[in-house]
Amino acid sequence: MSETTPVKQQTTGAYFGQAVASFGIAMAAVTLGIYFLDADAWVRAFLAIGVLYLVTSCFTLAKVIRDRQEAGQFVSRVDQARLEKILAEHDPFQKL
Protein backbone atom coordinates (compact mmCIF):
# COMPACT_ATOMS: atom_id res chain seq x y z
CA MET A 1 0.00 0.00 0.00
CA SER A 2 1.47 3.34 -0.99
CA GLU A 3 1.85 6.21 1.49
CA THR A 4 0.32 8.62 -1.04
CA THR A 5 -2.84 6.63 -1.71
CA PRO A 6 -5.70 9.14 -1.57
CA VAL A 7 -8.69 8.33 0.61
CA LYS A 8 -11.76 7.88 -1.55
CA GLN A 9 -14.46 10.49 -0.91
CA GLN A 10 -17.63 8.85 0.41
CA THR A 11 -20.23 11.44 -0.64
CA THR A 12 -21.10 13.18 -3.88
CA GLY A 13 -21.55 16.90 -4.43
CA ALA A 14 -25.28 16.40 -4.90
CA TYR A 15 -25.58 14.63 -1.54
CA PHE A 16 -23.64 17.43 0.15
CA GLY A 17 -25.85 20.05 -1.52
CA GLN A 18 -28.99 18.22 -0.45
CA ALA A 19 -27.75 18.03 3.16
CA VAL A 20 -26.95 21.76 3.22
CA ALA A 21 -30.31 22.65 1.66
CA SER A 22 -32.16 20.41 4.10
CA PHE A 23 -30.39 22.04 7.04
CA GLY A 24 -31.14 25.53 5.70
CA ILE A 25 -34.81 24.75 5.15
CA ALA A 26 -35.16 23.19 8.61
CA MET A 27 -33.49 26.16 10.32
CA ALA A 28 -35.64 28.63 8.36
CA ALA A 29 -38.83 26.73 9.25
CA VAL A 30 -37.98 26.63 12.95
CA THR A 31 -36.93 30.28 12.94
CA LEU A 32 -40.17 31.36 11.25
CA GLY A 33 -42.19 29.14 13.57
CA ILE A 34 -40.61 30.72 16.64
CA TYR A 35 -40.96 34.23 15.19
CA PHE A 36 -44.68 33.85 14.43
CA LEU A 37 -45.45 31.93 17.63
CA ASP A 38 -48.30 33.49 19.60
CA ALA A 39 -46.30 33.89 22.81
CA ASP A 40 -44.38 36.51 24.78
CA ALA A 41 -40.99 37.66 23.55
CA TRP A 42 -39.14 35.91 26.39
CA VAL A 43 -40.75 32.57 25.44
CA ARG A 44 -39.68 33.00 21.81
CA ALA A 45 -36.17 34.02 22.94
CA PHE A 46 -35.96 30.95 25.18
CA LEU A 47 -36.99 28.68 22.30
CA ALA A 48 -34.51 30.37 19.95
CA ILE A 49 -31.65 29.88 22.41
CA GLY A 50 -32.70 26.25 22.87
CA VAL A 51 -32.66 25.69 19.11
CA LEU A 52 -29.22 27.31 18.77
CA TYR A 53 -27.89 25.13 21.60
CA LEU A 54 -29.33 22.03 19.95
CA VAL A 55 -27.80 22.92 16.57
CA THR A 56 -24.33 23.59 18.01
CA SER A 57 -24.54 20.34 20.01
CA CYS A 58 -25.44 18.44 16.83
CA PHE A 59 -22.46 19.91 14.97
CA THR A 60 -20.16 19.00 17.86
CA LEU A 61 -21.51 15.45 18.02
CA ALA A 62 -21.13 15.02 14.26
CA LYS A 63 -17.52 16.26 14.43
CA VAL A 64 -16.67 13.91 17.31
CA ILE A 65 -18.18 10.93 15.47
CA ARG A 66 -16.32 11.87 12.27
CA ASP A 67 -13.02 12.29 14.14
CA ARG A 68 -13.43 8.88 15.79
CA GLN A 69 -14.19 7.25 12.46
CA GLU A 70 -11.18 8.89 10.81
CA ALA A 71 -8.93 7.80 13.68
CA GLY A 72 -10.22 4.24 13.25
CA GLN A 73 -9.51 4.35 9.52
CA PHE A 74 -5.97 5.58 10.19
CA VAL A 75 -5.25 2.76 12.64
CA SER A 76 -6.77 0.32 10.17
CA ARG A 77 -4.52 1.62 7.37
CA VAL A 78 -1.41 1.34 9.59
CA ASP A 79 -2.34 -2.23 10.54
CA GLN A 80 -2.96 -3.07 6.88
CA ALA A 81 0.46 -1.65 5.93
CA ARG A 82 2.16 -3.73 8.64
CA LEU A 83 0.38 -6.87 7.48
CA GLU A 84 1.39 -6.24 3.87
CA LYS A 85 5.01 -5.74 4.95
CA ILE A 86 5.01 -9.00 6.92
CA LEU A 87 3.44 -10.90 4.02
CA ALA A 88 5.92 -9.42 1.54
CA GLU A 89 8.87 -10.48 3.71
CA HIS A 90 7.53 -13.96 4.42
CA ASP A 91 9.02 -16.85 2.47
CA PRO A 92 6.69 -19.85 2.74
CA PHE A 93 9.41 -22.20 1.40
CA GLN A 94 12.02 -21.23 3.99
CA LYS A 95 12.94 -24.04 6.39
CA LEU A 96 12.37 -23.34 10.06
Image (cartoon, rainbow, N blue to C red):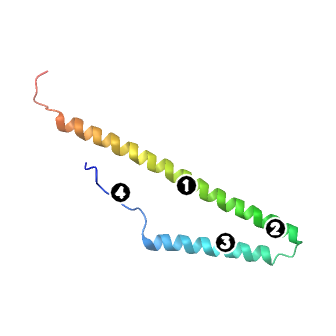
- Amino acid residing under circle 1: Lys
Quick check: 87 left or right of 69?
left
State the separation of the CA atoms marked 2 and 1. 27 Å
Q: What residue is pinned by disc 4?
A: 7
Q: Are marks 4 and 3 in contact (CB under 8 Å)?
A: no
Q: Which residue is mark 1?
A: 63
Up the image or down, 93 lies above or below 64; here it is: above
Closest to the camera, between mark 2 and mark 3, is: 2
Rendered location of residue 24, percent (x, y): 61, 74
- Name the amino acid, label 2: Ala
Image location (x, y in percent) of residue 31:
73, 74
Given the image, on which type of amino acid does mark 3 rest?
Met
For label 2, the residue is 45
Q: Look at the numbered discs 2 and 4 and tell me whether their residues touch, using CB distance below 8 Å.
A: no
What element does badge 2 sit on?
A: helix
Could you tell which of marks 3 and 1 lies nearer the N-terminus?
Answer: 3
Residue bearing mark 3: 27
Helix, strand or loop at label 3? It is helix
Q: Quadrant of residue 6?
A: bottom left
Instruction: Tell me the element at label 1.
Output: helix
- Cα separation, mark 4 vs mark 3, equals 32 Å
Mark 2 or mark 3, which has the lower sequence index?
3
- Residue 83: image quadrant is top left
